[in-house]
Amino acid sequence: MELDPHVLHVAIRWVHVAAMATAFGGAITVLALATRPAGDPASAVLSVAIRYEWMFWAAAGVLVMTGIGNLAAFGADLSGPSTPWGSTLMLKLGSVLALVILSLPRTLAVARMSQAAGSTASAVVWLRNLYGATTAAFAVILGLAVWLAHG
């Protein structure tokens, strides 16, 4: 029995969107915890951030694999980089690459904070800044993805 290629393409896109939702939603969750007025203890925010980092890197791997699968599904039908659509795709891919590269220091900072003796309020400020930047980057990438899907 042969698998319908359209079903496979839809499944790849669905997994891609689910991985993006996991990574973006997790960043929003950590940011929300770090910015609550009542404030959770720094150790609680850090605990969620540590879990998020594992999810982020798993989701990043899935996003790269499914993104390549999506590009392969379109193949020669993709517009070149000299077109507005192609330029936007290049901007999105560059933004994704920058997010992944700049996430390594964030992960290392969270790991270092988890090893430090006692979490402080300054750790929450750092987490708020780190996850604010991550959330903003995901928002830009999501905006570009929506534009590409409807452009």
Image (cartoon, grey):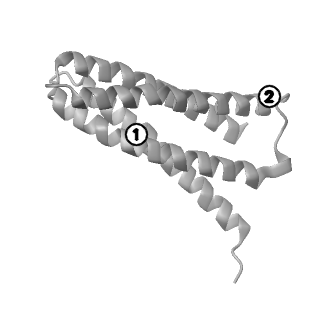
| Percent position of residue 11, x then y | 60, 61
Q: Residues within 10 Å of mark 2 (few under 14, many from 20)?
A: few
Q: Is residue 61 above or below residue 124?
A: below
Q: Is residue 116 left or right of residue 91?
A: left
Residue designated by label 2: 84
SS state under label 2:
helix
Residue at the image position 83 percent from the left and 39 percent from the top: 79
Residue 16 coordinates in the image, percent (x, y) = 56, 50
Q: Which residue is mark 1?
A: 25
- What amino acid type should be assigned to the residue bearing mark 2? Pro
Mark sitting earlier along the chain (2/1): 1
Residue drawn at point x = 63 percent, y = 31 percent: 144
**In the image, is residue 59 above or below residue 5?**
above
Q: Within the image, what quadrant is residue 96 found in?
A: top right
Of the 4 image quadrants, the one containing the N terminus is bottom right
- Give the quadrant of residue 82: top right
Which amino acid is tagged 1? Gly
Q: Look at 72% across and 67% down and name the residue there.
A: 5
Pinpoint residue 8: horizontal percent, then vertical percent: 66, 65
